[in-house]
Image (cartoon, coloured by chain):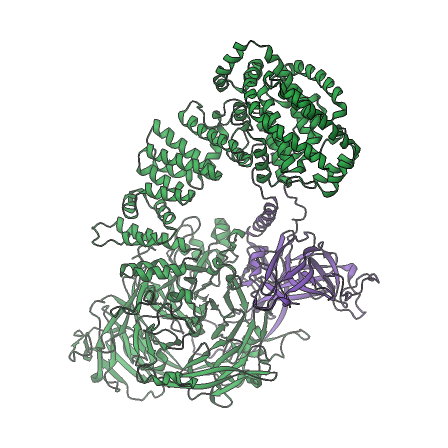
Chain colours: A green, B purple
Amino acid sequence: MIAVSTANGYILFFHIISSRGDKYLYEPVYPKGSPQMKGMPHFKEEQCAPALNLEMSKILDLQAPIMSLQSVLEDLLVATSDGFLHLIHWEGMTNGRKAINLCTVPFSVDLQSSRGSFLGFTDVHIRDMEYCATLDGFAVVFNDGKVGFITPVSSRFTAEQLHGVWPQDVVDGTCVAINNKYRLMAFGCASGSVQVYTIDNTTGAMLLSHKLELTAKQYPDIWNKTGAVKLIRWSPDNSVVIVTWEYGGLSLWSVFGAQLLCTLGGDFAYRSDGTKKDPLKINSMSWGAEGYHLWVISGFTSQPTDIDADIRNIVKQPSILLFQFIKSVLTVNPCMSNQEQVLLQGEDRLYLNCGEASQAQNPKSSSHSQLKPSREKSPFTDGGFESQGLSTLLGHRHWHVVQISSTYLESNWPIRFSAIDKLGQNIAVVGKFGFAHYSLLTKKWKLFGNITQEQNMIVTGGLAWWNDFMVLACYNISDRQEELRVYLRTSNLDNAFAHVTKAQAETLLLSVFRDMVIVFRADCSICLYSIERKSDGSNTTAGIQVLQEVSMSRYIPHPFLVVSVTLTSVSTENGITLKMPQQARDAESIMLNLAGQLIMMQRDRSGPQIREKDNNPNQRKLLPFCPPVVLAQSVENVWTTCRANKQKRHLLEALWLSCGGAGMKVWLPLFPRDHRKPHSFLSQRIMLPFHINIYPLAVLFEDALVLGAVNDTLLYDSLYTRNSAREHLEVLFPFCVVERTSQIYLHHILRQLLVRNLGEQALLLAQSCAALPYFPHVLELMLHEVLEEEATSREPIPDPLLPTVAKFITEFPLFLQTVVHCARKTEYALWNYLFAAVGNPKDLFEECLMAQDLDTAASYLIILQNMEVPAVSRQHATLLFNTALEQGKWDLCRHMIRFLKAIGSGDSETPPSTPTAQEPSSSGGFEFFRNRSISLSQSAENVPPSKFSLQKTLSMPSGPSGKRWSKDSDCAENMYIDMMLWRHARHLLEDVRLKDLGCFAAQLGFELISWLCKERTRAARVDNFVIALKRLHKDFLWPLPIIPASSINSPFKNGKYRTVGEQLLKSQAANPFLSLEIDTGISNIQRSQSWFSNIGPTHHEIDTASSHGPQMQDAFLSPLSKGDECSIGSATDLTESSSMVDGDWTMVDENFSTLSLTQSELEHISMELASKGPHKSQVQLRYLLHIFMEAGCLDWCIVIGLILRESSIISQVLTISQSSEVDGEMLQNIKTGLHAVDRWASTDCPGYKPFLNIIKPQLQKLSEITEEQVQPDAFQPAAMGKTSEQTSPRAEENRGSSCHGSIPQIEAGSNSVVSRKEEDITSGDEEEHFQDGTYDCSVS
Amino acid sequence: MIEVVAELSRGPVFLAGEALECVVTVTNPLPPTATSASSEALAWASAQIHCQFHASESRVALPPPDSSQPDVQPDSQTVFLPHRGERGQCILSTPPKILFCDLRLDPGESKSYSYSEVLPIEGPPSFRGQSVKYVYKLTIGCQRVNSPITLLRVPLRVLVLTGLQDVQFPQDEAVAPSSPFLEEDEGGKKDSWLAELAGERLMAATSCRSLHLYNISDGRGKVGTFGIFKSVYRLGEDVVGTLNLGEGTVACLQFSVSLQTEERVQPEYQRRRGTGGAPSVSHVTHARHQESCLHTTRTSFSLPIPLSSTPGFCTAIVSLKWRLHFEFVTSREPGLVLLPPMEQPEPATWTGPEQVPVDTFSWDLPIKVLPTSPTLASYAAPGPSTSTITI
């Protein structure tokens, strides 16, 4: 029956007659032969409109305009403008109209003050009212803006029995809406806010629960400009309320005031061109079935703006809009709250958080969550999907969209409940009849095979998964019987495979805890069942048994008010200490959400304890429950888990509550530390409220994360020009999608604990979470928030929290990092306050250095630079720079160079300003640095410093390298930096860390060649060839050569080598004679010459002769060809090195062909080739070789030649060395070095021997050269030699590489003196060595 | 007893051309306290990726296969044939790689080996259609001495982004890397480069939006306008379209939109009709939206493209194309009054027509569906990313 009120005070009653048989309208008649689904069972319901008939049955004249109509059970309550309330029976029109004059109803603040005042004035009437069944009364709004609640004192509804209560402070009410489940009255006000009241159970007074208000912070431009609240509508499931205002706009709020959506926000309010949209004006609206739709009658009050006039005209006539929504399954099936997935249900599809599979593997991705109860989409929207980069995958926003089987939907629309199993792999949905389930793995739906079974079953109380089973509470239509059924997922969906238990009353709620099922029934009782798996043969079922029944009728006024019932292991007493072995805790208590009031009933353990010891397992479960205790008010959802984790007991045993606009609350257990007795004064649990910015839909317990979803609006306006926008109305509406969000909350809880002096608990909690990837962020957030609050507070804070927080953070190794990150994100003005609490930044910097945390130290440098005088920051920067160099932190080095220069320039010009100081070590700083160095560097234009090509390096003029870093090479800062770089390079070279040196030069663009030229005779000298060789082997992972067993034999079987042995003996015999002449300074050379002669003994004479000839020629030629530059480029005439000259240093092939090798030697070498190091090392070594060659560091070339075992290199080096410009000392050094190597090879590394043998001819040559060079020295005046000896060190200092070749004579002279002395010392060793050699040979 | 576990840490979905990495863990599951006599040995283990092709007899006429290639692979027990015992033919395989030889495991001992292989870029995508199936598998074969080979098959899903095949990794531009001391992880770089390039291309292809409008009319007049904002989509995206029926002259009672794939056997392989073969074209519906739209002026729909579906592709034998398939139910009677007359002075009962003669017609709009990031596609299949076998 429909009642329609007219403007003049008539009520028209219509009967709806739907009988007319099985008749439908608009039945499509398909042309013959079309393959349409005419034969389908629900064809008509699906495709046709039901034929309803409206018949006017009665007209009633109330003689005054009707303000409000309300259906109250069998009656119709009508409020008229003359101040009367009429009660009209729906059917019996003659039922004796009751009219109550409002003036006769007493109003008071509460029901206890029996005598209330009357509404004195005659023109008072009700503007809006709504009946609340669960409170049994009317919420009313009077025409003067006052609001109130009228309730019959007794069951009789007469004027005398009515009594009203009102809040004193509301005087601008406009409309009202009632939430029956939560017993809330939402009054819209002229100010634009909605005040939600509830009734105090004891006094009957109206209590303000919360307000729905747009905040000035979030909506600065529309706050207070919305006009009065026009309409308020609670959704059919009572979980959300939609509000619209006089000036348009829609907003959606959760029960207790969490804002879910507002079309007045930025997303909806503006067009892309910046003009403001007219908000959607709504005349009337109503929710569709299950809250999936909002039907809206829109009225665009024509208020045309200039541009949009024509669009307005099109839309001006009122139209019906349909908004689609999706909601969280928690709103209707609260048993899902112990699960960690987010599942949203829409009219025809489910949205599922799909990060679950990866969650186990990747803790970070566990933050993926899903949608929310408010997918909003206007039917006139435009579509498309937001583009999304691959880089955002980790935090991907995708979800599984599961389209509900259309076959099921056709006959069972709408979907009422859905649930997902623990693993997130199976989903079950419940529609009007029966249910269906879906496997995400197979992507298949399973429906009842027998439609009759489906249609005979109405699920009444939700459904839950228990392992592979689905537990449902349903009504069996054919048997008229309430039942509890368990179906197995894997078997066919058929009652034959179901376990059915009869239930006494309609089940309203159902939830599963471990192996227990808890149901709440319409008779206000709670029933516990045990569930167990039974398999008899192939048939697997689950059995259900009643464990316990608890009547709640004493506490629950109406079963409809119960929002959720869950069984938890949470109890007020933890009972056990933290260390106590943790067995799975039992179902300790029942949590019951009664209209937002969370009630806990614990098991009563105060009874005789003997029961506990009883062996009957069911005995304990039958422990009675204590009387209920109220834990919290305004609760929307409760999350607990039945899992246990010893490490994270705080998080797992806590109870998490979402409280709408008030944020979340956690009921945290407090554990005594160690085994100490719990303090008697310390309660064992604490309720901590905290704010989060999202609407929580799932709690990930271990991960300390809350998942939620937000409505995200996509604007398509920008796609079109104004012209097309005029043509296509689609553009007028935004398109909404739901985005998943997640939030960490740990810092709130830690802070709350610290405020309450529960630092110990905070520490325990934090330590249990320290492994979470975002834990550093948590600490930082906490520090930052406290700092911001306390440092910016106007009044002095009596008991500041910051020191406590700082102290708390020191407990973690992340302390240094946390502090500096926090400082960097705070403004400079707060730094003093911060560091007063956490300690002096200088000390913190040094701690970082000690802890080898250079990056953090670098961050502190920025702080220091702003807080200290330049000298201090420079000193620290130098310290850090050196450490960074040492550790090879190249990026940091580059930053530091930049930084040092920045403060340097500041030193001389202006004091450093904060922004420039922060830049260098911010991540963007490197870019800046790089650009600058490119633009300033003349030698490497267009080449980023990190990518110096070899060609460039080689062609670079070997001028002072200081030029690279700045325009003004004279700048003291640059000199300073260069000095440090040089020092480091020297240090590396002296330590034979060639690999590090290479990296250093490459990373920092350090010009090795020019530097090496300068250092040729100092740091770049090889002091100990053997150590250098060993070290290179190690650093470059280059295997030491090994002589294969066969080859050890073969050379010595060779007749040729036998003669070698003989020669060796001979030469050794000659040695004593030579050694007598040590003093002459020639003996060494001669001796070595004779030693070298062992290599090619048969050609000794010829070699000597021939080597004299070309050597003499070269000595004359090379100075001419080479000019000033020290380059190997001139050596083009040397066949061995031709490939090197081309710059092809990566060449791998060996030029053995130029050497006269016997077959056996070739074989030998080819075998050795197998023992080469990695290719990369080889490339690197060749690169270094090239550098050294260029810089004239021949001794290093020799070492590398040795390690590469390429005689071509050796011979090339030696050829170069024959040029007169190479100083004798170096040759001498090479010679002695090679001797040492040979000795070492003989004793420790015979693998080198063959190679050394190969290069013997060259070495012999070398000794001759040295001889040559030394001999002329002998003719020099002794005095000259001495002076040069004294002056040479200084001369070397100043002599650039360019003048290298100009004073060969003096060099040679001075060096020869030195080398002589050295030879004196080493000669003894060589004697021994020779004996060793002999020994070797004789053994063979 | 030896347990072999293969784990694809990144998930089972890869882009062709990407490197696959699989960690193979071999464990002796006995407790370490067991006697030493129970140490176990494996002679060798080898791994190989292959793509198995299988065509439906009734739909595809393949050239007569070589007699040496029976449809079911030989069941050889002693040779490492990754596709042993599978139907169809192996059309693509990577060279087998040996993981280890002569492995001995004491009780409780466990060893892990990493297998890495670049998936062939030129292969077909993973696809299970009506006519053909392309199935990728990573097969790990192990053999104990004197025992037949045991195969552990790890199913893979390969997405193919066409166009990537022709692109070569930029071989160290003109500015060759300079100093060999500058660390450059060539392999990793190339891999990420490919993924990056694929991402860029996908972005470029799918992020551009422009409104396409289509006038829909049947023989009698205009039904409405269909608007769609993109024509190229990625897996996992929603296809969103709007339908404006307000301006139409023909009343539309109902419409449905299906997101479909059309699998078509190439003409040269089609089995001729009449010989009892099934049609050479088959359609699969992935998502569907149906709405009764009488009196509706504007409406919209959103159809999700399942992450688990195969993007469009074309091989020599078969082609897969995506389309939106519309079906409209329109009134045959022009000028059918669907609303009660507004200006009726006398009270009267108005009844809607009980039957409306209708026509149905359909319309196909081709769209393009491209792959998405393999990591994202991995989410489509919840479940373990490990495969286990016990020898």
Q: Nearer the viewer, residue A392 or A836?
A: A836
Is residue A776 visible in the rendered image? The answer is yes
* A995 in relation to A221, above or below: above
Q: Nearer the viewer, residue A1309 or A112?
A: A1309
Which quarter shows the C terminus of chain A? top right
**A1144 lies left or right of A123:** right
**Residue drawn 34% across the image and 33% down it:** A912
**B187 lies left or right of A647:** right
**A332 lies left or right of A869:** right
* A72 in relation to A1280, above or below: below
Q: Looking at the image, which residue sits at the far right?
A: B67
* A1021 in relation to A867, above or below: above
Q: Quadrant of residue B236?
A: bottom right
Q: Looking at the image, which residue sits at the far bottom?
A: A479
Q: Position of residue A430 (x, y in %)?
A: 50, 77
Q: Position of residue B46 (x, y in %)?
A: 69, 58
Q: Nearer the viewer, residue A612 or A431?
A: A612
Q: Nearer the viewer, residue A25 or B389?
A: B389
Q: Quadrant of residue A1319?
A: top right
Q: Position of residue A36 (x, y in %)?
A: 64, 74
